[in-house]
Image: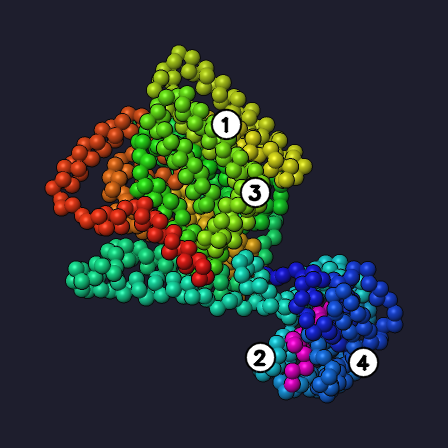
Amino acid sequence: MMHNYQPTDISTCLNHSRILYVGDSIIREQYFSALRLIDPNVNVSGEAHTDRRYDFAEENLIFEFWWDPYLNKTTHTLRDASLHTPRPSLLVMGTGMWQMRFLEDDYYEEWKKNIDSLFDSIESKSIADAILLAPVEIPDYGKLRQERASTMTAEKISAMNAYLKEKEKAVKNKTPFGIPFVWNDVSAQATNVTEDGLHFNSAVTTMQVQIALNFRCNNQLDKSFPMETTCCYQYPVPKWYQNALFLFFLVWIPIGSFFLSNSNPGMTHRPFPSLKVCNAFFIFGLCVIYMYFGDRTQLFGKIQKHFDVSMFTVMMIAIGILGVSKLQHKTEGDQGFLNRHQTDEWKGWMQVIILVYHFCGASRISGIYNAVRILVAAYLFQTGYGHFFFFYKKADFGMGRVLNVMVRLNLLTFVLQYLMDTDYLSYYFAPLVSFWFLVIWVVMYAGHQWNQVPSFLLVKLAVSCFFTTVLIKTPGILEFIFDLLQVVFNTHWNAAEWRFRLALDAYIVYVGMLCAYAFIKAAEFKIADHPKWSIMKRLAMVLSVLALVWYFWFELNCVDKFAYNRSHPFISWIPILAFVVLRNANTYMRNTHSEFYAFIGKISLETFIGQFHMWLAADTKGLLVLLVQPTWVQGMGWWVNLVLSSCLFIFVCHYLSQTTHEISTWVCSKAMADNHHTTNKAKYQAVPLLPTAQGDSSNAITDDVKTEQEDKEEIWTSLEEEEKPSAIKRLFNDTRVKVLLFFMIISIVNQLC
């Protein structure tokens, strides 16, 4: 993956201010393209076979061209240059065409002699900061003049380039040196880019110049997140906190597993968790370290994303077929409105669309981008729906519940921000859902004893919506909060970016909460038994179809995605509610789901975050290549790599999901024990990251509450018989104190990072 160099970048990198091109007319065309990168209007007219020099005072750069088509005098000139003459910051040389054209049978020996002399100079003296020797160009044979075509043959060029490859492997260079054979690939893959078959236009030569600049400058780029340039780039050495994580996962945890497996557990229970948790930590560690080696080393290749409508279409059809082929239908009973299987499926098919969207780089297409924004909004709708349902029915506002949700949501993101040396907010989905979960918790906890009063609850939601809107949209508030966090936690978060993320979906969570409340009340009043319910259902279905048609008409006719973004917060609820109505239109629809999508839905959190480093690459800017030779990713090789990387990606995400759940349960076990009533799993996920409801949910939840009251009585009876712990022990066993200590430790660690 390449960096696109601009004049300022070039000036910053080439600090010796002298760039030298030496060779024939082919190299001269590259030289002209290099000049145009600095000044698009530069005048390059003049005599052809002569030296050139251009000074760019503002950029403090000097571009020189030496006419030396045989490359038989430059080597000595550079080698014997005075110490007072600044050596080139970048030296680009090329030869071969004139030997073939004019030296007849002696072409190879004469060319080889000059090449050998050049390599001797490269090995004996640093004649430039970085040196590139152009491969012998492969011309467009069909456009060559007869006299050129008869002498510049494919056999000659192949032999000369083969010799260059041998020399490149054996050279012991004192300065960075390379032969960019990829230059020939650039010209070969382009069409209509040459008039005479020998001299290519700027579409080719500019790319060749960019490759040269990437070779010279990329290793001087800032080695910090996001690392979107991988060509000619050496990744930074792991920092102390990254090494600490390596040691924890690969040394400390295996030692713990060994002792727990082979020793008296009583001797090792203090420094280590249980064997089951150690195994979970080890597998989790292997998964995240795989991400590190995939996206922070050169072990695997990375390639640019290029949107291709046919590729996008094929991938969408493929995932559609996979989903339909695994349909499952339950013939007994009614699974209920937004039941577990349905919401898992909903999360799943949305997630695979988002994955394909990111993989194909489709964000530049407004019509696709706009629709994907609805999918993100739908996740937040489910967040509002699910957590409101839980808090309203179970009234569990304890720290154990909050900690359980927050750890489950953020464990992977928390580890990755240190291991990958990234930014917490860059994995925006986990922070986004965490923010809205805390909002829902605060709203439902405030005055929770009156939550059953409709007017109080609705006013509370309206007030919350007002305050979150002010928080998000008022300039200066987020900036102040982020500045404070920077002082305390040494974070460097972008308030403008976070405001954009929050503002896009500022209201859909409240729509989800209202939808959950409406469903609860409809069940209480038995609206489904109303004589006109069937008419109301049909009307809702017709309106839903019309709403979807209108939405897609609207989003496809927006001027661009920026115009759509202005409308999105106010209209996203329309297609979402329309989908919910149609998806739950009858018992057959509610009882049917896709097992494939449901499987993906269960690991949607891990796939959303994991894609950053093990399906995509370069912090989502590129694609990961698992094939041994990245150059194989052409034609069918691209699809082979897609299948291979996708299978491994899903495999790793599956185990990340399992181990994250296990680790979260262990981390929160004491807090959950303190709030024992949250551990009942009969009708709810341990952490309903997104909503899950069951048929007859109102009755089921009422039964749960009765069971919890009985359990609580048993717990308090047993606690009365236990010895009362000391005040200090009670203090440090308090979940709130533990959370405070955790943030204090993070503050110290971040200040040292």
Instruction: For marks 3 and 4, give the CA distance.
Output: 71 Å
Q: Relative to residue 717, is residue 477 drawn left or right?
A: right
Q: For mark 1, does the 10 Å Cα neighbourhood hold few (<14), some (14 to 19), or many (20 or more) residues? A: some
Type of the residue with mark 4: Phe
> Where does residue 12 sit, x and y in percent of width and height?
67, 66
Residue with the mark numbered 2: 169
**Residue at x-position 61% and y-position 49%:** 308
**Of helix, strand and loop, which one carries label 4?**
helix
* For marks 3 and 4 on the same chain, the one whose residue lies earlier in the sequence: 4
Type of the residue with mark 2: Lys
> Where does residue 350 sit, x and y in percent of width and height?
48, 40
Which color scheme did the rendering employ for the protein?
A: rainbow
Q: State whether residue 719 is above or below residue 645.
A: above
**Of helix, strand and loop, which one carries label 3?**
loop
* For marks 2 and 1 on the same chain, the one whose residue lies earlier in the sequence: 2
Residue 643 in view here: no
**Which mark is in front, 3 or 1?**
3
Residue with the mark numbered 1: 578
